[in-house]
Image (cartoon, rainbow, N blue to C red):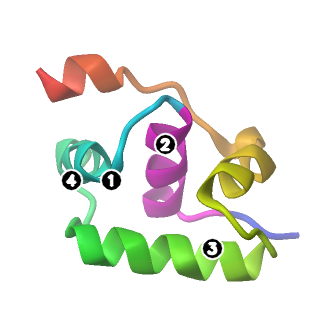
């Protein structure tokens, strides 16, 4: 069974709640997750797409929806 790290969970959760990559970076910083650079996030997404056999980020978020945790992205971005 595949599980996600806390880092991966925050990325998928932020994307599921409508955040773009720049906003995901801020969410990761808010929760003290490293690395939080745009390129690190993009590399992690590429890795996850390959691991879960997904072609798009949308498909990845859909497939991993069961791992999404509720975070208040709007509040974090203020």
Asked if residue 6 is among those painted magenta in the image, a careful observer would answer yes
| Above or below 13: residue 44 | below
Q: Judge from the rendering whether residue 73 lies leftward or rightward of residue 76; answer left or right.
A: right
Instruction: Give the mark nearer the N terminus: 1 vs 3.
Output: 1
Front position in the image: 5 or 78: 78
Which residue is tagged 2?
A: 15
For marks 2 and 3 on the same chain, the one whose residue lies earlier in the sequence: 2
Q: Mark 1: give few (<14), some (14-19) or many (20+) Cα within 10 Å.
A: some
Which numbered circle lies on residue 48?
3
Mark 3, secondary structure of its residue: helix
Q: CA distance from mark 2 to mark 4?
A: 17 Å
Image quarter where the N terminus lies is bottom right
Secondary structure category for the residue under label 1: helix
Element type where label 2 sits in the image: helix
- Residue position marked by numbered label 1 in the rendering: 21
Judge the density around disc 2: few (<14), some (14-19), many (≥20) Cα neighbours within 10 Å: many
Verify whether residue 7 appears in magenta: yes
Q: Dot 4 corresponds to which residue?
A: 32
Badges 2 and 4: C-beta atoms under 8 Å apart?
no
User: Marks 2/1: CA distance?
Assistant: 8 Å
Spatial separation of the CA atoms under disc 4 and disc 1: 16 Å
Regarding residue 35, the answer to whether it shows in the image is no
Q: Relative to 72, is 6 on the left or the right?
A: right
Q: Position of residue 23 (x, y in %)?
A: 26, 43
Q: Give percent across and percent down for residue 59.
A: 74, 54
- Rounded to the nearest whole Å, what is the CA distance between mark 1 and mark 3? 15 Å
Residue 28 is at least partly visible in this image: yes
Q: Which residues are magenta?
A: 4-16
The mark that comes first in sequence, 3 or 4, is 4
């Amino acid at each position: 069974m595949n599980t996600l790290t806390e880092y991966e969970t925050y990325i998928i959760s932020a994307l599921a709640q409508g955040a773009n990559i720049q906003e995901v970076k801020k969410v990761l910083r808010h929760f003290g997750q490293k690395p939080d650079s745009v390129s690190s996030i993009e590399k992690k997404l590429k890795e996850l797409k390959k691991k879960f056999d997904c072609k798009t980020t949308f498909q990845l978020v859909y497939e991993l929806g069961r791992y999404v945790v509720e975070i208040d992205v709007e509040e974090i971005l203020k």
